[in-house]
Image (tube, rainbow, N blue to C red):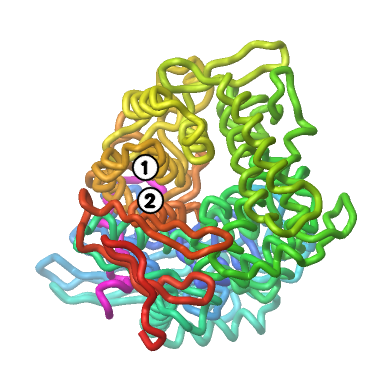
Amino acid sequence: MSESIPTCADMASDPLVHRYDDLFNPPGLTNFLGCAQVDHDVLALRSVNFPPYSQSDTVTGQLYVDGRLARSFGAPVTVTWRPDRVVRETVLDELELRTVTACPPGTRGVVVDLRVRNRGTAARTVRLGLALDSTVTRSARPWLAAEPPREGNELRVAGSVVVGAARESEAVAVQGIDRPAVSVAPRRIEVELTIAPDAVERVGYVHVLGADSAEAHADFERLVADVPAAIEAATAEWDAELAAAFTPGNDRFSGCLPQLHTDNAALRKLYWMGALGVIWFRRDNPVSVLGRVYDTLMPRYWQTTTFIWDYTLSSIVHALLDPAVMRRQVAHWTSLDIHTHFGTEWQHGGPVGYWYAVNDYAMTRLVRDYVRFSGDAGLLDEQLAAASGATKPVAEHVVDWARAWQGLRGKHGLADYGEMDNLLECVSSYTHEVASFNATNVWALRAAAELVTGRGGAGSAEELRAEADELAARVLELYVEGGYWRAGQPDGVLQPVGHCLDFANVAMAMHADLTAQQRSEMVQFFVRELQTPTWMRALSPYDPDATFSLRPDHQWNGAYTAWPADAARALYDLGRGDLAAAWLDGLARSANQGPFGQAHFTTEAAPDVNGGARKAPPQAPYLIDWACSSSGAFVGLVLESVFGLRVPVDGEPTATPALSDIDPGARLSGLVIKGRRYSVTAVGLQPEPVDA
């Protein structure tokens, strides 16, 4: 394989050692139909959900060794994740246990291959038990809660397998092993292995979901016939998937990402993991009414939901890798009322949740990124009807989104975005007239001007730019000497808040509107109060609201997936790309646990893992999923900041790379913009030969 195209082996995590109930988020797996999560012991599974069939976070397959629960030994378990598998290893009572878990392609199920080595000096017979559970259901309603549905099951023995049947819907789960059992009961299967000294014996465990026993049994029999082959099929599928993602003209995506050629391991790691953090969420499930979609979180929370905000944070990846899907997704969201929800559920296509303040800016950014990378300006003329209004061209919808803030004016003449659930959910002082989204309103007005130039209609480009300049002046009134911002409150108070969202969004949207002193002070504030060697704090630990919550995605004890990437881009925007370049090594060390999590802890909140910021766990009070699709923000950092790529809506793309502090010899190849292929080197952007 090319050194610029990763394989599953290239993407492997570090070996991650944990004990039961450590602050550890167990890895997930997917085959693009659904997903599953390994549990804390060496064999168990949880969150096995393949829409339309779900079991929420039910745990099954917990291992017993000679009658004793394996996790009760207290032995550490070493976990290594790859896109195609999770390897778990432990030693119990002179037995070396190693499992490989995979979601084979094309099946609503999971396989686990367990190998047991006898490290003793005498042969021994080991009795292994699997404690089984099932809560499978097929809900007739959309999945509108954080955890997928479940229902009570009747578990029964059917020959050599255990079948869990839903009591109120048409859904079953079939579980069993691939060698003769010595005992099969509704909630337990046992097998005996006789193992010579230093020899290895194996047993495979299979868990599948289906509409009825016949369907599930058929899938079960196919997998149980050769569990190791099913695992190898997952490897072949994932290697092909990764290769396609970086290959122009591939048959798996409607576009591709450029290949990165570099000797800088940190840059390569961030780019590849950023890309994988989007590919990972692709869902090609036949029950989707929207066709192919990209989920936002996995493997535990909000399956089947695509959040507008998170999708936008990976907007460049979507525009390059799968523009056809992006176009369809944008059109679907345009047809709904984006002021009443935070995303959509793909089994039914309808809205999910409450309104997020980001939505107007997000939709504007999605349309702009799609048009400027694809060259499909026809989208701007496409007639679409929003749920709350008349049919109009997308260009006019963009103007509506850019001006939507005017209907939200608060006490200080800026958009009032309401309470914390509309914003960051766990920062109680970050409410109402915040700097971040008022700054992105400035950006949206200017982006709308770029998109409508030459099209006429509602709002000329000149008018939009003038409105942006006027609004920018108001936003600057929120600035606090020292590098941070205030949030205007309905009672007239201007509440100082030291949050990274203001730092990143104001820098992105309004860096040219800031004075040199403000830019310098913002950088100093970030370095002093938010940046850490391997990750960052979302909220300053000096902020009075740091006591409010322990959710590490937006509080003092960690940061959400995309915030380090966006903060690094902000450093470039503020003229301190050197600081961002020096930070890349530390950020890359935090990609050592698989795709970036929904949040990682700071070192002060939880010890690093092998030198990388620890993924936060899913249980309360943290409530953090193992992976999040906004990882694509790191791809944007590499392309637009490190390589200085500039792609206007009209006109030719350019690049002014900043590679001297990273890798002067780094380059991109196979970058497809508006149907033409380019390479980018330290000297800039050059067209590639047609047959390259």
- Give the secondary structure at mark 2: helix
Q: Amino acid at mark 1?
A: Tyr
- Give the secondary structure at mark 1: helix
For the stretch drawn in magenta, the main secondary structure is loop
Q: Residue 280's spot in the image, x, y percent?
A: 48, 64
Real-space CA distance between mark 2 and mark 1, rounded to the nearest whole angstrom: 6 Å
Q: Which residues are magenta?
A: 1-26
Give me the disc on residue 572. 1
Q: Nearer the viewer, residue 410 or 69?
A: 410
Q: Residue 48's spot in the image, x, y percent?
A: 55, 63
For label 1, count other residues whose C-alpha is less than 10 Å away and answer few (under 14), some (14-19) or many (20+): many
Which residue is rendered at x = 26% and y = 41% of the image? 578
Q: Nearer the viewer, residue 309 or 154?
A: 309
Which residue is rendered at x = 57% and y = 62% of the image? 650
Q: Is residue 636 above or below residue 503?
A: below
Q: For mark 2, what is the residue?
A: 641
Magenta stretch contains residue 19: yes
Q: Residue 96's spot in the image, x, y percent?
A: 22, 64
Q: Quadrant of the C terminus?
A: bottom left
Q: Looking at the image, how many numbered discs can be counted on the residues?
A: 2
- The residue positioned farthest toward the right in the image shown: 390
Tell whether label 1 touches label 2 (CB within 8 Å): yes
Which residue is rendered at x = 67% and y = 35% of the image? 422
